[in-house]
Image (cartoon, grey):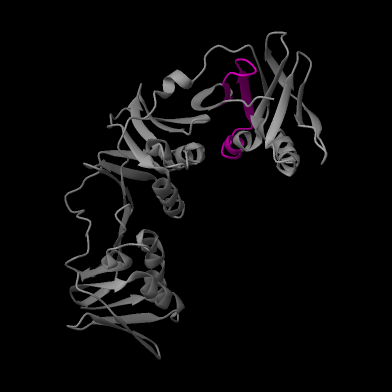
Amino acid sequence: MKFITQQEDLSNALQIVKTAIATKTTLPILTYVYLKAENDILYLQSNNLEIGLSLSIPVIVEESGEVCLPGNLFGDIVNKLPSVSLEFTVNERNRAIIYAGYSTVEIQGENTEEFPKLDLENIQPQIYLNREDFLKGIKQTLFAAAEDEIKQVLTGVLMESKDGYINLVAVDGHRLALTKISSSVEIPSVIIPAKSLKEFQRIISKIKTENIGVAFLDSQILFKCESVYFTSRLLQGQFPSYDKIIPSDFIIGFKCNREDLLGVLERMEVLASADQTNTVKINISSQEVVLSSLTSERGAGREVIPAEIIGSEENLEIGFNVEYLIEPLENIDSEEIELRFTSNLGPALIKIPNDESYIYVLMPVRL
């Protein structure tokens, strides 16, 4: 095996595939990166059995071949080499030799037979999604997935077809986040681990392309973005009937500037964290909306926010985990935001005015 490439190109590729290199595993080969050179293309793969990554870069191939190299070591070495052309050779003992200007580095590799290669030749995307829409959908739902793995399906994000949309839904028992992406293509319902989507979000945020291809396999989902293929295992189980969680009858609500509300909540969070309650109180009357922290020995805060009151003349006092209010506001790019309430102990809803593509439902706390 022998090829020539630029240090920057190889280093950038390795930084991507390093994401799926296993760190703690009983299968040592999962800590390696698979390389295959042929037809002036270098293919790189990593796979930790949770997620897998594959990409290709153009190189000058002088001799075809394949090898597995220790992933983190290989990536760190290439990253530290001078920014010059690299000549890469692998001998019959799977020992890789890299010539970089005046530098020569040797890395002992392994045979490729045990590596779980991603067979991508016969996989075609079943649907294409706009990259910006999908990125926004991930951003607006991911934070609402559960971290407690006792209920494993809640650690994932549901992806399903419904009423001419592809819905992304996350639920953790206290809140629900739902984003709708317009699509006429029907897809199977799958639950993608939130950790996998977080890694995919980080990768595709750096790739400037218009569309993302999606393929649904037996127990995996595959995303294709330019020359990058990302696979993730799917979670098995029954996702909650989230439609039943979304309220439809409200007694009062208000509409306000998103950044104004976010600023007030962030100030209240300082006090709520100091007294360890993590609670913010909202008082709504026909005249005004007041946000306040719970009074404690360490201090208290109260602030009136400019808002348009929606609904009845009835007053409402309700409390929430302040972090659970801040997170959706941080991930919505709308200028205005709308909050609606069912009762002081019932679910509240946050949405974008005149836009049904995003819904966030949150349960209150007892004051």
62 on left or right of 197: left
Q: In which quarter of the image is the N terminus?
A: bottom left
Q: Is residue 326 magenta?
A: no
Residue 254 pos. (x, y %): 67, 20
Q: Where is residue 4, by image quadrant?
A: bottom left
Q: Is residue 176 at least partly visible in the picture?
A: yes
Residue 129 pos. (x, y %): 36, 39
Determine the residue located farthest toward the bottom in the rendered image: 102
Residue 223 pos. (x, y %): 32, 47
Give whichever of 333, 20 is nearer the camera. Answer: 20
Q: Is residue 43 at least partly visible in the picture?
A: no
Q: Does the magenta stretch include residue 329?
A: yes
Q: Residue at x 56, y 39 (%)?
A: 331
Q: Residue at x 72, y 27 (%)?
A: 281
Above-or-below relation of 228 to 61: above
311 on left or right of 53: right
Q: In which quarter of the image is the C terminus?
A: top right
213 on left or right of 155: left
Above-or-below relation of 256 to 112: above
* Number of numbered discs overlaid on the protein picture: 0
Above-or-below relation of 296 to 42: above
Above-or-below relation of 164 to 141: above
Residue 100 pos. (x, y %): 38, 85
Give whichever of 297, 353 is nearer the camera. Answer: 297
Q: Residue at x 52, y 30 (%)?
A: 175
Magenta range: 327-351
Give whichever of 269, 35 is nearer the camera. Answer: 269
